[in-house]
Image (cartoon, rainbow, N blue to C red):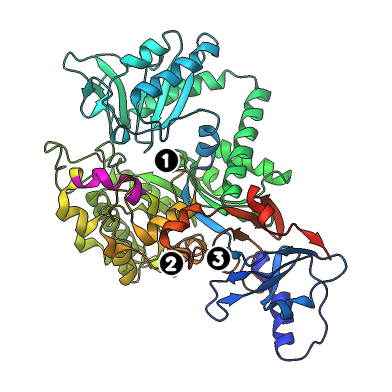
Amino acid sequence: MTQRSLRVLPFVIMVLAVAAGCAAHVDPADTVLRDGKIVTMDSAHPEGQALAIVGDKIAAVGSDADIQRYVGPNTKVIDLQGHLAVPGFIESHGHFTGLGEALTQLALRGVPSWQQVAAMVAEAAKTAKPGAWIQGSGWHQEKWNRSPGRIVKGFQTNDLINQAAPHNPVVLAHASGHALIANDVALRLAGIGPSTPNPPGGEIIKDARGRPTGVVVDGAEALVERAVAKSLAARPPQDAEADFRRQVQLASENALANGVTSFQDMGESFATIDGIKKMVDAGALPLRLYILVSQREVRPDDVDSLVAHRMVDYGSGHLTVRAIGEITSDGALGSRSAWMLQPYDDDPTNSGLNVTTMARIKEIAEIGLAHGFQISVHAIGDRANKETLDAFQAIFQEHHVTGDTLRWRIEHAQHLSPADIPRFAQLGVVASMQAIHACSDAPYVLPRLGPTRAREGAYVWQSLWKTGAVVTNGTDVPVEAISPIASFHCSVTRDMVGTDSAFFPEQRLTRQQALATYTTNGAYVAFEEREKGILAPGKDADIAVLSRDIMTVPPDSILGTTVLYTLVGGKVAYTGADTAHAAPVAAR
C-alpha cells in the first residue's frame, strides 16, 4: 500500500461513521461540485448529484442535500447546472514529450494533400535560418485527396520538399510514427545515400535507380533522428532546458483541455525522466504522469541506472516510473510494416517487419521482471501479437508468476489471429488499445488485410471484453489528437471517418464499457485503482466536467462535447471557453 493509499483511510472512516449515524457534523469541504450528474464508476453508488472535496481527495458523493452540509463560508462551489462529471480521463497510451514537440512543429494531421504539406514547408523555410531544421508530423498518404505525384512502394518521394526548402534539412514524421520523409539536405546530414544498407528492423526506400526517395521506415528512422539529435545537442544548455519546459507545458495544457488528468507515457529516456522529476519538484507539472522507461535505456550492463529511476507515487502522485516500453515488436499498418502471419492483400510480397528481435524483447522482459518493472510491448500485426503472447507465456511459466499480478501489456493489439483473442484473458495480459485508430484507419484496413482478416481480428474490442480481458483506451497522441471524446465516440459507434458506414459494428463497446476503458481500466493497468478511476470517498479528486452527457446523448452528438472543467487533486487545472454556460467557481 502506498503512502497516498494510507491517507485514504481517514476519509473512508469518516464516511462510514456518517453512514452509521455516528457523526452529526462534518468539517467544511475545500470544494463542492453540485447540481450535476455525477457518473462515479463505483458500482456501489453509480450516480450522484454532488460531491465534496477535502484537500486532494473526495470526501463524499451524494445528493445536493447530502453534500450541502459540507459547504462552509470558505468552500469553493462549482454549480454544474446539470452537466456531467466523470472521473478524470486516463490516457493509457500516448507520447507525452512527443505531444509537446508536435505542438512546436508543423502540424500535418488533416492536411489534405502532399502538395499542401510542401507549401507549408516552403512557408516555414522563408523565416528559417540557413541550416536550421524544419520539422513536422502527422502526414498520412492514405488520407490525401489527390495523388502526391511520383510514388515508390506506396509512398511519395521527397521532390516537392527538396524544392520547398533547398537550404534547410526537413524531416516530417508519418502519423503512425513508423516512417518519416526527409529532404536531400537531411539525408546527407544523416549519411544516407544510394549505397546505405537497410539497418536491422528498418528500410530505406529507394527508387528503381537505387536513389533514396526520402522515406525511411521503422529501424531506419534512427539514422535521421540521430542527425536531428546532434543538431539539438549543439544548443546552449539554457536554451535546451527552456525548450524542454515549454514542451512539457504545452503537452500538459493540451491534455488538461481534453479532460485528461493522468497520462501513461510510452517511453522516455533517463534524461527526460530526470527533467520531468525536476519540474515535479518545482510544482510545475499540473497533471499525473506514469512514465515507461524507453527500451533503449535497458541494458544488461547498466541495470543500476534503471533501478535508480524507479519511483512510485512521487510528488503526491504526480510521477510514477515502474514500467518499460513500449518495446517495438513491429511497425504499423499504414506503412505496411506491421508484422503479419500472412502477406498483405495489397502487397503480396510483404508480411511486415520484426523491428526488435524476440530475443531482445525477452531479455528486456527478464530484466523488468527481476527488478519490479511492468513490461509493455508494441504489437500491431497478428504475428507480432502471437509472438509477444508466446514470449510472455514462456516467461510466466518459467518464473511461476501470473499475468494478473504483473499486468504486462500489449500496446495496440490491433490485428489478432482468432486463436489469440482468448489468450489475453487467459494469461492476464492487458490489451492497451486506442479506439480512435479503428475509425480513422478503417478505410485502408480492408485493402491491407481483406474482409475476412479484418472482420475476425481487427480492433476486436468486444470480443476481447467478452473473454474477460482488460481493455484500456487512449489516442496514441501525437499520432491522433488527444481527445478522449473522439475515442469514446469511436468506441461506441465505430463510424469510419469520411463515410456513412460502421466498421464491423458488432465490436462496439457499450457506453459504460467505453467509459471504463478511460477510467477504471486505465487505473488498473497502472496499479493505481486504489487511488483513481472512480469518484468515491478517499479517491483522488481528479474530475472531468463535460458540456454534454456522453452517456445518454444521441451518438452523433457525442463529438460536439467539450470539457468545461478539469480538476486534478481537487484543484481546477483547466477552465473551458464554454464555461459561460455553467456557473463560475464561487466561494460560499
Label 3 crowd bin: few (<14), some (14–19), many (20+), radius 10 Å: many
Q: Which mark is residue 533?
A: 3
Can you see residue 188? no
> Does the magenta stretch mainly form a helix, a strand or a loop?
helix
Disc with the residue nearer the chain's start (3 vs 1): 1
Taking the magenta stretch, the answer to whether it contains residue 445 is: yes
Q: Quadrant of residue 531?
A: bottom right
Where disc 1 sits, the SS reads loop
Q: Which mark is residue 524?
A: none
Residue 232, compared with residue 362, is above or below; it is above
* Alpha-carbon span between mark 1 and mark 2: 24 Å
The reply to whether discs 3 and 1 touch (Cβ–Cβ < 8 Å) is no
Count how many numbered circles sit on residues in the image: 3
Look at the image and give the residue range highlighted in magenta. Answer: 437-446
The residue type indicated by label 2 comes to Arg
Mark 2 lies on residue: 511
* Alpha-carbon span between mark 3 and mark 1: 25 Å
Quarter of the image that includes the C terminus:
bottom right
> Looking at this rendering, what residue extends furthest in the left direction?
348
Mark 1 lies on residue: 479
